[in-house]
Structures are given as C-alpha cells and as structure tokens.
Amino acid sequence: MLYQLYESQRSLLEPFADFAQVAAKIYNNPNLPASQSQIGHRISASYDLFYRLSKDYVKPAFGLHSVTIDKVEVAIQERVEITKPFCELRRFKRFSDDPHTLTHLKSQPVVLIVAPLSGHYATLLRDTVKAMLVDHKVYITDWANARTVPLSSGSFHLDDYINYVQEFIRHLQQKYGNCHVVSVCQPTVPVLAAVSLMASRKEQTPLSMTMMGGPIDASLSPTAVNNLAMNKSLSWFENNVIFRVPENFPGAGRRVYPGFLQHTGFVAMNPDRHLKSHYDYFKDLIKGDNSSTVAHRQFYDEYNAVLDMDADYYLETISTVFQEFKLVKGTWDVKSVEGKLERVKPQDIKTTALLTVEGELDDISGSGQTEAAHRLCTGLVKQSSHHLEVQGAGHYGIFSGRRWREVVYPHLKRFIADNEPQTKIAVRAVNKASSKSKATTTARKTSKA
C-alpha cells in the first residue's frame, strides 16, 4: 500500500513540478524585466528548487563519448554485450583512426567492473569507468530496476547474482583469454564468492580481483548501516520495507525493496548535509554562480536516481552478509545454475591476485571490513596480496573524485599491470637472469678461493 501511496503522491506533484520548471525559466529569462530584479532572482530560484525537490529522477546516462589517450582523442561507443533479466553486461568500446593508438588499445588489460546493486544505478561509477578507460578495456554490470522486470522473468536471488558474475567472467575469458575484476561496495562479497567457487571447481579464475569499500566481514567496526541490518530481525525487514510493485509498471506484483525507501534512508544518514546543500544551491541560483549550480544538479541527478531491488535478493543479502556472516564463518552454500549447492571456500583461490581498498573515513563499510578478504584467501602467496587505506577518503572518495583519481587509480593501475601475463613473464625472466648471474659470480668467487 505504501508504494501505491507514494506513486499517487508523485503523480499529483508531477504537474506542479512541471509548472515550477517553466516558471523558473520565465523568471530567469534575461529578456523580461522581472529577471533583472533581486525579487525576480529569488522567485526563479524558489521555483527551481521546488522543481528539483519534487521531480521524478530517472536513470542517468553514462554520457562517456570520448577519452584522451596519449594526447589522442579516442571515441567511445557504449553497447550491451550480454542481456540477462536483471542485468546487462555493458561494454565501452574505444575507436581510433590512429594506427599506433589502435595497436596500443588492443594490448591493454580487460577489466570487469562489478557495480553495486544497493539502491543506485551503475552510473554512480561513471568517474571510475572514465578513469579506467584510458588504460583498460572496460566492461560493467548494469543492474536492472526490479520494477521494470516482469514477474514472468522469475525471481532474483543472491545466488543468481553470483552466477551472473561467473557468466560474465567466463565470457571475457573466452573472448580475451582472461580478465581482471573490480568490485565496489556491495558486490565485494558475491564477487569473492564467485571467484572462490570457480577456484574450487578448478576453473580458470581472473588474473586479479580488486575489492573496494565492501562488507567482507561486516562484524568489524560496524557502521550505522551495519547496525541497522544487524539489530533488526529478518522478519522486521520483510514486514517494513518490502512492498509489491504497483500496476503501472512492467514488474507489477513483484516484491521489492523500493528505491524511494532506500533514498529516504540515504538522506536520513546525513540530513543536515543535504539540507545545507539545497540551501547553498538556492543561494547560488540567486548569485548566478553557474559552476556551483551545475555541480549540484549533476550530483543530485545521480544521487536521487534510485532503483528497486528484488525482495529475495535483498533479504538474502541482509541475512547472509550482515546477520549470519556466512562468508567469514565458512558456512555459505550457493546454488549453481545446475541447481547444485556448493560451499564457498576463499582459501581455494590460488592464482588470482588480491587488492583491497578502504577509505579512512568510510561511514558505510567500516575499517577492516574489506581488508578481511586477505584473512580468508589463505591460498594466495604474500606477494599477491595488497591493501590500500586512503587517508581522508569517505566511502565515495575511493571510487569517485580527486582521491580516486590521484591516489586509488594509480595504485590500481599498477596492480593490474603487474598481474598481466606478459608482465609476470618479464619479471620471471629478469629474476631468472639475476639468479643465474648471482650463481655465476658465486661460482667464480669459489673457484678463485
């Protein structure tokens, strides 16, 4: 019933939001006398703010059309490579007429970015994708809004998420020989499970996996988000946040955790910050500070665009990750595509290098939660395991913004390059030559002695 009430309210507000948008433009028209007065600026700003607060936010576009590589502008074509009921594997294919650049592009590593399915769209990682496109072939998981998926497509479980990730990895392995996997926030857990299961089956595993700001062990340094998931029973979540999609959507009747409820939770974590941001936006409109107002709109166009999550997937994530801690306790069984239950054993991973990244000020995934992956992946040699803590970075700062570009990405770029096959072969050759040189020197010294 709550979902229906929300949609009714949104429908009622829609014409007023449209009117406010038109009115804001009228009072901001330089050809009208009213726009030249202080009162006109305030009226326009008030209408604009009302429009921003009451409009419906749809899924944003990635909007990545080109990238500069070695001073050459390279065109980007966004395409869907695999379509599943609840996800698309999206590729950002790069094109260039410059022969040298084209050869360089073909030799670069392949990266699968697994985006979170936790309220926002994959476009939240736009900055992540943009940076990585300079040095990598980039693919990303683009999760569907559950309210757009018809009931005939079936349900979606945490096990399905893991099976999707494995299918995408196998696809890239078949196409390129192998790949690297980067997971941000929520998917760190299912990605570790996916790679663990592949290792247990003696399948080829990715060359490396990078886990950024995720709840591998949510019992460590619990945040407000963790505490909510831990302190409420699963039945509480089912009774209070799960609703059926209204009739006016393709997924009518599907049980979901609605996006508007998730958004309410996001805002409730820092209400004062959001209130100040909107008030500053109002003042910037009056002052005519275009750069600040554009930045505000860009941020909230992304932040306010939310999706519904299938109820089965959401409740299973709460139970598995935040209440029973099945991954760290070694009690997690996942159902394969064939219907077989398989135990998740991170210790079986032998050949996939591991990098974990945490933000010092992360208020979503607490300190040590992501680093815990190293204690689980005991089959890896020490040289294959790396951890990075980003000083002064919050949750979003490790994959977006200045600290991502200046601190995290250079580290991640080196990590991926170091785990490319040709790099490892070159390193082994150098080490072998060095060993031979040392052996020869020792032999000479011995013979002289």
Image: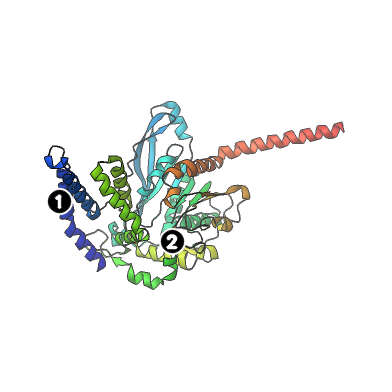
Of tags 2 and 1, which is closer to the observer?
1
| Mark 1, residue position | 19
Q: Around disc 1, counting alpha carbons within 10 Å, would you say few (fewer than 14), some (14 to 19), or many (20 or more)?
A: few
Q: Position of residue 105 (x, y in %)?
A: 45, 34
Q: Kindly indicate whether the residue at mark 1 contacts the one at mark 2 (C-beta within 8 angstroms).
A: no
**Which quarter of the image is occupied by the C terminus?**
top right
**Label 1 is placed on what type of residue?**
Phe
Looking at the rendered structure, which numbered label has been put on residue 64? none
Horizontal side, residue 26 vs residue 347: left or right: left
Identify which residue, 140 or 82, lies in the foreground.
140
Q: Position of residue 56 (x, y in %)?
A: 24, 54
> Which residue is pictured at 17% across the width and 44% down the height?
25
Q: Earlier in the sequence, mark 2 or mark 1?
A: 1
Identify which residue, 441 or 348, lies in the foreground.
441
> Which residue is pictured at 34% across the width and 38% down the height?
77
**Label 2 is placed on what type of residue?**
Asp
- Quarter of the figure with residue 328: bottom right
- Quarter of the figure with residue 70: top left
Q: Count the marks: how many?
A: 2
- The secondary structure type at the circle numbered 1 is helix
Residue 204 in view: no
Q: Around disc 2, counting alpha carbons within 10 Å, would you say few (fewer than 14), some (14 to 19), or many (20 or more)?
A: many
Q: Position of residue 41 (x, y in %)?
A: 19, 45
The residues tagged by marks 2 and 1 sit, at their Cα atoms, a distance apart of: 46 Å
> Which residue is pictured at 72% across the width and 37% down the height?
435
- The secondary structure type at the circle numbered 2 is helix
| Mark 2, residue position | 159
